[in-house]
Structure formats: C-alpha cells, structure tokens
Amino acid sequence: MVMLCYNQHMKLLKSLPTALHRGFTIVELAVVIVVIGILAGVVIVGYGTWNRSVAEATLKNDLQAVLGAMEDARTFENSYPSSLPSTYAPSDNVNIQRDSRSNAKRFCFTATSTTQSSLSFYIASNQSDPKTGSCSANWSPPVVSLPVPSAVQSAGSYSYPGGPTEFGAAHYGDSVAFGWNDPTTTGGQPIEAFRLRFDLVSPCSAQNDYVLEVARLNNGQSFSGSNYGLSRSSTGMYAISVSTPLGTCTVDAGLGAIYVSAKTVNGYGAERQYFVELQN
C-alpha cells in the first residue's frame, strides 16, 4: 500500500514540468495578435482625434487673439492696420492669412493648420467668434444701411474693390465704374438718357446729392462733359470719370450709393440703387 502511494506520487511530480512548460498553440497566438491589433487601433484613433481637437482649439484661440489685436490697433489708430499687429504672435503650426478685401474699415483672417490640412477657420471684423471655413468662401463685407427713396425699385448688392459687377460699383481715385440692366425701352417707351444721382459720404463729397444727366450710349460709345466722362464697354459696362465731387476723395471713406433712373418721353422713371465703395 505504501509502495503504491509512492509510485503515484512520483508519476504526478514527473508530469508537472510538462504541463507547466507547454507552449501556446497557433490559435492562441493568433488570438493574442488580434487583441493587440485592436488595442493598438483604438489607441491610434484616439490619439488622432485628440491631436485634431488640439489643432482646432489652437486655430480658434489664435483667431480670437487676432481679433483682439486688430481691435486694440483700431482703438489707437482709428482704423484697422493693413497687416497683423506685432502684439499678435502665432502659435506653432498655425498659418494666418489676411483676406485681400480687407481694408481700414473691415477685415477677415483665415487660419489653417500645418499639421491638419483639412482644418480651416476664419474670423472677421463683424464676428465675435471663429467660424469653420475660409474668408474667400464664406465672408462678405457688411453692407451699411443707406437711405433708400420710396421710388427705388430694387436695391443692388455690394461690390468689392477690385471689379464692378452688374449690381454694384467701385471707386478708384477720380473714377467710378458701374453697370446696370440697360433695356432699350422701359414701360414700352425708348430710353433717351439716364440720370445718375451720387449719394456719397464725407469727406469724398461735401455735396451729399450730386446729379449727372447722360445720354444713353450704345456699346463701345463714350461721351465727355465739362467735369466728367462716360463710356460704355463692348459688354455694356458703364464707366464714369468725375472731377467733382469724387476727385476730392483722398482716403478710404466708406460707403455711398449711386441711383440710376431712365428717361423716356414720359420723363424719368423710378430709381435703381447701387452701392459704391469709396477707395483710392
């Protein structure tokens, strides 16, 4: 009996090393590898999300700093500077671009990340917080409210310096370029002439209401008066050069308007309003 117990005990001891040192099977190794891969993926995705969040917060903070610096500069200079003030220092991996339509009265800046190419935010002088996107795609300078006579049929839209449109005007030095819908008739009557009424802000005009009457031009024609010249391009765009009152404008003076009305045998009809930006 004693010998039998001894033999069983020895067999058990001899079997222990084999059980303890048995290696992983291929299936077990595969499971371990899959688990490690899943954990690594979770960590990488989490890090990428965190990194993007940090970049986004940095861009927004920088734009808020830009807004503060521009407003501080305007407080001391009575106008917005033409470049970023020295009081603003960009953060690492942040690129700030000033929109070309910015001037002494309004601005817009776009911030992009050098590490997150898809991130882009912008802030403008008429905003309090950064917005997603860029100035070029989303920003339009505000249109200042102007007095509109009751006879106005419809108001035009603001035109940026850099080129007139069919519904606006831009001022450079002594000239204003603008265009309007120019039908050959109105109310069934042929158009004989146009009346241009300039409603401009000081100091560009000591005279708030300045009226010119011009004959209707065909495409490619031009006309010169004592203190102005009018021409019409081959595409129908009118351009006028005026020595008074626009010639006195030597600073960026803000917004004004031009009112255009057409004359037929029945007299002048209702006015159409066009905003004009006054800049040298």
Image (cartoon, grey):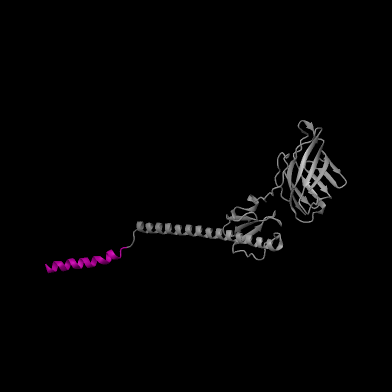
Residue drawn at the location 62% of the way across and 56% of the way down: 123
**Residue displayed at 11% across by 67% down:** 1
Compared to 229, does 113 lie above or below? below
x, y percent for residue 218: 81, 38
| Residue furthest left in the image | 1
* Quarter occupied by residue 84: bottom right
Q: Position of residue 91 (x, y in %)?
A: 60, 64
Q: Which residues are magenta?
A: 1-22
Magenta span has 72?
A: no
Say above or below: 73 vs 197. Answer: below
Picture quadrant where residue 29 is located: bottom left
Q: Residue furthest top?
A: 188
Residue 62, position in %: x, y?
Answer: 60, 61
Question: Was residue 4 drawn as part of the magenta stretch in this picture?
Answer: yes
**Residue 279 image position (x, y, % from top left):** 76, 53
The front one of 32 and 217 is: 217
Asked whether residue 235 is in view, the answer is no
Residue 31, visible in the rendered structure? yes
Q: Specify whether 130 is left or right of 165.
A: left
The quarter in which the C terminus is drawn is: bottom right
Q: Main secondary structure of the magenta part?
A: helix
Q: Nearer the viewer, residue 226 or 151?
A: 151
Viewer-closest of 203 and 180? 203
Image quarter of residue 109:
bottom right
